[in-house]
Image (cartoon, helix red, strand yellow):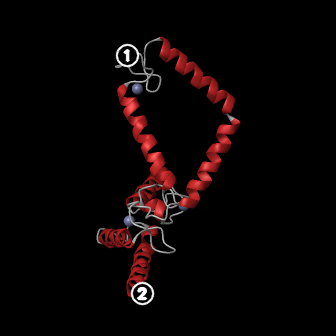
Amino acid sequence: MSTPQQQKERREYLIARNRCVFCDKQDAYTLIGKRLCADCSQKQKEYSIEWRKKNKERLRERKREVYKERSESGKCVKCGRKLDREGRKTCSRCANLQRKVDEKKVVNKNRGSNGLCWTCNKVPHEPGEKLCKACHDKIARVAIENQKYINREEHIWRKSEHERVLETLARSSLQAEK
Ligand SMILES: [Zn+2]
Ligand SMILES: [Zn+2]
Ligand SMILES: [Zn+2]
């Protein structure tokens, strides 16, 4: 069994190499900077929906309390800081943040379903792939670059890393030949 310190190291190691912190897999999700792969994200989403469902009443109650408390004392209902805008319930900082979140949501919602590359969201992705050729190559390059800094002796899970990159390379050169 691994200690919390080892778990932390493993997590950091996987994040730095764009791998899922849960199952060690690499896919378009982890390559765009998410900590979990598509499968694990899905599982976690289901789990959190389940949890929310179970705690719905309690959560709603708590939220209502906080909202009331903050709104009555002239604080931002989101962060609890002093309000800097007249006649609003949220501060300008939270409003900006929310706007960005909303914009990102739209982008994420359309990601992949519009036939565009998951990373740049501009170029159509390769058939059967989630990334366009340019992004795929860019990521492959970063992966090779990362290899140089890996001390394979230090962690057991690093041993297979080199083989995986070689596999990725083989695959991308096969695609280039097509
Ligand atoms: Zn995963
Ligand atoms: Zn705020
Ligand atoms: Zn792309």
Image quadrant holding the C terminus, namely bottom left
Along the line of sight, which residue is nearer the eye, 130 or 153? 130
Quarter assignment of residue 61: top right
Q: Which comes before the other along the chain, label 2 or label 1? A: 1
SS under mark 2: loop
Number of marks in picture: 2
- Residue at image position (45%, 64%) is 116
In the displayed structure, 17 sits above or below 4; it is below
- Residue at image position (54%, 16%) is 68
Marker disc for residue 86: 1
Is ligand 2 closer than 8 angstroms to the Cβ of mark 1? Answer: no
The amino acid beneath tag 1 is: Glu
Does residue 3 show up? no
- Residue at image position (38%, 18%) is 83
Is label 2 in contact with label 1 (beta carbons under 8 Å)?
A: no
SS under mark 1: loop
Image quadrant holding the N terminus, namely bottom right
The amino acid beneath tag 2 is: Lys
Please state the horizontal and vertical placement of residue 91, each as a whole percent of the image: 38, 24
Does residue 37 show up? yes
Which residue in the protein does label 2 denote? 178
Please state the horizontal and vertical placement of residue 176, each as a whole percent of the image: 38, 83
